[in-house]
Image: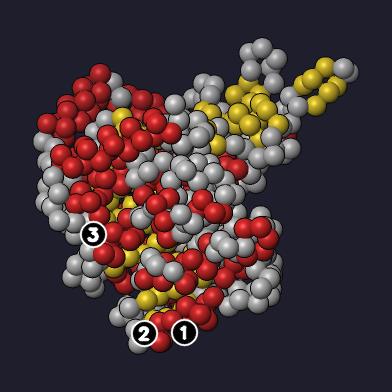
Amino acid sequence: MCGVKLIVVLMLTNLSLVENFKEDQAHWKSLGEEELQRALNKKITEGVAKNVILFIGDGMGPTTVTSSRIYGKGESGHLTWEKFNNIGVIKTYSANKLVPDSCSTATALFCGVKANHKTAGVDATVEVDDCEASLVPEARLDSLITWAQQAGKSTGFVTTTRVTHATPSALYAHIPNRNWECESKIPAASSSCKDIARQLIEDSPGKEINVIMGGGRQCLQSQVNGSDADPIDTWSCYSEDGRDLIEDWKADKANRSVSHQFISDNLELENVDLDADFTLGIFANGHLKLDYERDTGPNGMPSLTNMTEKTIRLLQKNSNGFFLMVEGGMIDFSHHRGHARQALDETVAFSDCIERALEITDPSETLIVVTSDHSHSMVFSGYPDRGSSVLSTIESAMDQVPYTSLLYGTGGPNNYQFVVENGTVVRPDPTIEDTEDFTYSQQAVVLTDEVTHSGTDVLVYANGPMAHLFNSVHEQTYVTYVICYAAKIGLYQNNSSTVALCFYIMLAQFMALLLYR
C-alpha cells in the first residue's frame, strides 16, 4: 500500500513539473500575443439593447472575485464575466457614508441617484427613519423597472434573498428604513408609511413586475410556520397583521383578467407555464438556502441558475424585450457571518448562473452587466504556493503560528479568536480545525457584531449592445444611465442624445455638492 502511495505522489510531482515546464518563456510570449490579438480584434456592439440583464453579486468585491476564481476555476481560469471584453471600476460610497450598505448602493445602481445609508428608492433629502420625507413625491425615485415598463418591456427580478430585502427593494419601493420589510418593524409614529412588502404587491411598479422569484414568505404572509428545512428568519421581520399578500397578488391579477401563477418549490418551477403573464415564486420563509446545502429534490428550493433560466424564458416572449435584475445575495450573507468558503461557493454558483444566461440569450440584442453593490473586509494574504487551496494555511515567520490565506478585517465572536494565555494575547492555530469546511470561521482582526462591508471600489463587466461604455472609473450611478441609453428607456426612450446624458449627470452631481457642502 505504501508503494502505491509513493507512485501516486511521484506521478503528481511529475505532472506538476510538466505543468511548470509548459510555463516557460515561450508559454508567456504565446499567451501575451493571444491576449493582445483579442484586444486588437475587439468588436464594439452598437444599436439598441432589446433586453437587459443586470447581475448583482451582493458583497462581491475584487478579493472575493479573485479568491472565487482560484477556488472554482484555478488561478489561470476565469469566472464567466471575466471573459467579457468591457470592464470598468465603480465607486461605491453612498450619499452619507464612505462604506455603504446594500439598499443605498442598489438605489444608485437602479435609480441613478445616490441615497443615504439604509434608505431605498429615495434621494438624499430622506434621512433614515424619516417617514414624512420619504412621502414627498419629489424625493421618490423611479427605477429601471419603472422605465422598462413604460417602454412596453416585460420586467422581472430574481434573488436568493427575501424579495423584500435591501437590494431588490430599490427596484420598486420608496422607504426610509430597509428594515421596514413588513408592518411589525415600522414604529407607530411612522404608520403613514407603507412597508416594503405591501409596496411590492399593492403599488406600481411592483404589482406590474411580470416575474418575481426569491424568498420572504414571512414578510408577505402572517402566521407562517418554520421547519428545519425552512426556518423562520430571525434576522428579518415577521408579519403580524393577518396579511396574506400572496393571495392579494393572485386576486389583483384575477381582477385584471391576466394569466398568473404562484410557485413554491423545485417541482412547480420545473413545470411552470411559460405562457403566463405574471409569475410569483416564493421558495422560503426568509432567504433561500445556500447552494451547497439546499434540497435539490422536488420539494426543495431552486438554485439561482434554475430561477434565472425560467425567468428569462418567461420574459422572452415579449417582442419589445425585457429588463431583468438577478441578485446573488448569499455571497454577502456568507461574508457577514465570516464563512469564506460559503461566499466563494456562492460566487461560483453566481458565475454558473450567468453562463446559463449567456447560452439562452442573443448577445447582439441583450446587454448583460455584471457588478457588485459593495465589497467586504476579506483579504487574501501570505504567500501560498501555486496549486494550493485558497482556503489553505501558511505559517507566520514571526510567531510560527499558521494563519489562513483568507482573513477578515472585522468579524463576529466566531471570527475574533484571540485569547489570553499566561497574561499574553495569542492567536490560536487554525490547523486544529478544518479550514476547508463550509462553516469554518476565518480569523478577524477587530471584533464587531458581524463582518462589515468594505469601501473598496468594485468592478463592472459588460457584454452586448453599448457594453463598451463601461471603460473607466465610474460613479455607481453611471450604471443606470448606460442601461437607459443602451435600451432607450427612461431619459432616452425618445432617442435623447448623449448631450442630455452628460447634462443630467452633471446636474445631479452639482445638486449633490450643494446638499453636502
State which quadrant residue 471 falls in.
top left
Residue 451 in the image: x percent, y percent? 62, 38
Q: Of 333 and 222, which appears nearest the observer? A: 222
Left or right position of 363 against 350? left
Left or right position of 290 against 444? left
User: Label 1 neighbourhood size at 10 Å, few (<14), some (14-19), many (20+)?
Assistant: few
Task: Establish if 508 lies above or below 494.
Answer: above
The residue positioned 17% from the left and 28% from the top of the image is 36
**Residue type, mark 3 in image:** Asn
User: Label 2 neighbourhood size at 10 Å, few (<14), some (14-19), many (20+)?
Assistant: few
Q: Distance between the residues labelled 1 and 3?
A: 29 Å
Residue 73 in the image: x percent, y percent? 40, 42
The N terminus appears in which quarter of the rendering? top right
Task: Establish if 242 lies above or below 390.
Answer: below
Residue 335 seen anywhere in this rendered image of the structure:
yes
Residue 439 in the image: x percent, y percent? 65, 46
Left or right position of 363 against 288? left
**Residue type, mark 2 in image:** Arg
The residue positioned 52% from the left and 68% from the top of the image is 198
Q: Distance between the residues labelled 1 and 2?
A: 9 Å
Residue 255 in the image: x percent, y percent? 40, 87
Q: How far apart are marks 2 and 3 (CA)?
A: 26 Å
Q: Disc 3 designates what residue?
A: 51
Q: Mark 2: which secondary structure? A: loop
First reached walking from the N terminus: tag 1 or tag 3: 3
Q: Disc 2 designates what residue?
A: 256
Disc ID at residue 298? none
